[in-house]
């Protein structure tokens, strides 16, 4: 049985030249060929190879194992560093989305109160004393919501959002003053509110985008975000228009053919927005059945309530020969439907925050497991290297060779 083709060098004496010992059963010349330098190599290259060869032979065996171990650590550290970098970015992204919950809720509140104020203003300007008092209180509440949102927007330090916010803020201040002083009528109030709210929806979109919610990589979270932050506000606005226009018609007990057609178009848009929001919610629930358990019943109830309001608008206003339905009852029922939309919106936002916190927790656990596994493997590799070095050196030290091998010292 032939021994492995290795060359073992022993130092006979510090001042002596290094001699080579070859296994007796290795054919002559084989070891010389292994250590020989190609004849066509430049002189400088031969010198460098001789120096490198001498440097390697001066190393003790345990030192060579350390070098190999360090090389292995570097090779393993590169993908590990990339993994930890990616998980850190994923954690930061999820945390940023969580941070966006409060500003999103604040702009939702502004939109909701502005819509409610639009409905009450229609009744108040139509002559309802009860609605006039409620409108004044609602104006104060809405102004406070605008002030809170203004503070939040300045904290975001986003010029695009600040520019988009400036106009609706100014328009609200002017509109609320005009209504309080009686300088505008029902139609003008409706037009002004209806112009204002889409501007608020733009602020909503920019605010949500600022926190990267539209880029969530998980299908369940992404579809829920679409339903909650992008589709639901537009559904609520179309329902709010249906409420405001219907209240104005019922308050004056008359509606022209053109007004009925306009209301019919609004009802159709409500239907489209309802379908769009429901589709996104169903996609989220399909990707995460837990969402259906948590939100399914509430969404179905909201969907049915909104559909009921569309049927009421069709029956009592669009297709009715005489407008005899109570404007106050219509306002209350449509407001209840819109409040239900915002309620399911709030509940869905809470579920989303829980999902994001769970993602962060899972990422931290995965990082801890990977780190623990890597450290354990490093320790095992170190122990294995030590045992291998010792198992190689001890038989050589105990052999009957003329001198003990320097490279096994301290092994």
Image: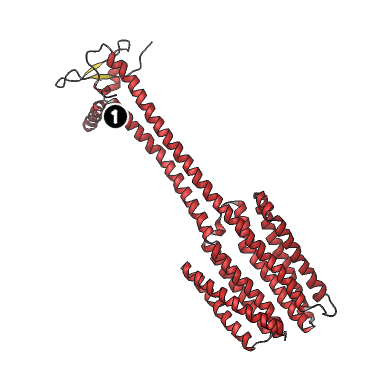
Quadrant including the N terminus: top left
Q: Is residue 35 left or right of residue 237?
A: left
Quadrant including the C terminus: top left
In the rendered image, residue 234, in percent from the top left (x then y), is placed at: 65, 67
Q: Badge 1 is on which residue?
A: 63
Judge whether 233 appears above or below 279 on screen: below
Label total for image? 1
Residue extending farthest to the left is: 15
Residue extending farthest to the right is: 321
Q: Residue at x 67, y 49 (%)?
A: 289
Q: Residue at x 76, y 73 (%)?
A: 264
Q: Is residue 68 left or right of residue 270?
A: left
Question: Callout 1: helix, strand or loop?
Answer: helix
Q: Is residue 109 left or right of residue 313?
A: left
Judge whether 378 appears above or below 169 on screen: above
Indicate the quadrant where residue 173 lies: bottom right
Judge whether 151 appears above or below 355 on screen: below
In the rendered image, residue 363, in percent from the top left (x then y), is placed at: 51, 47
In the rendered image, residue 405, in percent from the top left (x then y), is placed at: 25, 19
Residue 269 makes an appearance in the image: no
Q: Which of 42 and 344 is in front in this view?
A: 344
Residue 365 makes an appearance in the image: yes
In the rendered image, residue 316, in percent from the top left (x then y), is placed at: 81, 75
């Amino acid at each position: 049985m032939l021994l492995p083709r290795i060359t073992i060098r022993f130092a006979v004496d510090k001042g002596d030249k290094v001699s080579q010992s070859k296994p007796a059963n290795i054919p002559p010349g084989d070891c010389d060929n292994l250590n020989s330098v190609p004849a066509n190599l430049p002189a400088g290259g031969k010198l460098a190879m001789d120096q490198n060869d001498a440097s390697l032979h001066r190393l003790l065996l345990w030192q060579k194992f350390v070098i190999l171990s360090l090389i292995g650590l570097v090779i393993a550290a590169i993908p590990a560093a990339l993994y930890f970098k990616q998980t850190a970015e994923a954690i930061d992204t999820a945390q940023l989305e969580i941070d966006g919950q409060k500003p999103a809720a604040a702009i939702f509140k502004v939109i909701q109160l502005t819509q409610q104020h639009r409905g009450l203003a229609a009744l108040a300007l139509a002559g309802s004393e009860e609605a006039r008092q409620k409108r004044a209180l609602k104006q104060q509440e809405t102004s406070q919501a605008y002030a809170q949102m203004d503070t939040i927007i300045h904290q975001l330090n986003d010029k695009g959002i600040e520019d988009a916010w400036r106009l609706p803020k100014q328009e609200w201040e002017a509109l609320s003053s005009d209504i309080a002083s009686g300088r505008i009528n029902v139609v003008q109030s409706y037009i002004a509110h209806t112009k204002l709210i889409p501007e608020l929806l733009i602020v909503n979109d920019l605010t949500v985008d600022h926190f990267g919610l539209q880029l969530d990589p998980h299908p369940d979270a992404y579809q829920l975000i679409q339903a909650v932050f992008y589709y639901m506000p537009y559904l609520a606005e179309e329902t709010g228009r249906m409420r405001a226009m219907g209240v104005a018609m019922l308050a004056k007990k008359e509606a022209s053919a053109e007004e009925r057609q306009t209301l019919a178009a609004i009802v159709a848009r409500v239907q489209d927005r309802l379908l769009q929001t429901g589709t996104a919610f169903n996609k989220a629930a399909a990707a995460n059945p837990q969402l259906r358990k948590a939100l399914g019943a509430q969404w179905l109830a909201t969907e049915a309530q909104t559909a009921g309001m569309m049927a009421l608008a069709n029956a009592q206003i669009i297709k009715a020969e005489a407008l005899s339905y109570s404007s106050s009852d219509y306002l209350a029922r449509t407001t209840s439907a819109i409040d239900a939309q915002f309620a399911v919106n709030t509940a869905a936002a809470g579920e989303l925050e829980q999902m994001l916190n769970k993602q962060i927790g899972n990422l931290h656990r995965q990082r801890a497991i990977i780190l623990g596994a890597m450290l354990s493997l490093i320790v095992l590799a170190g122990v294995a290297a030590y045992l291998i070095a010792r198992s190689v050196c001890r038989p050589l030290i105990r052999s009957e060779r003329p001198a003990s091998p320097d490279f096994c010292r301290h092994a």
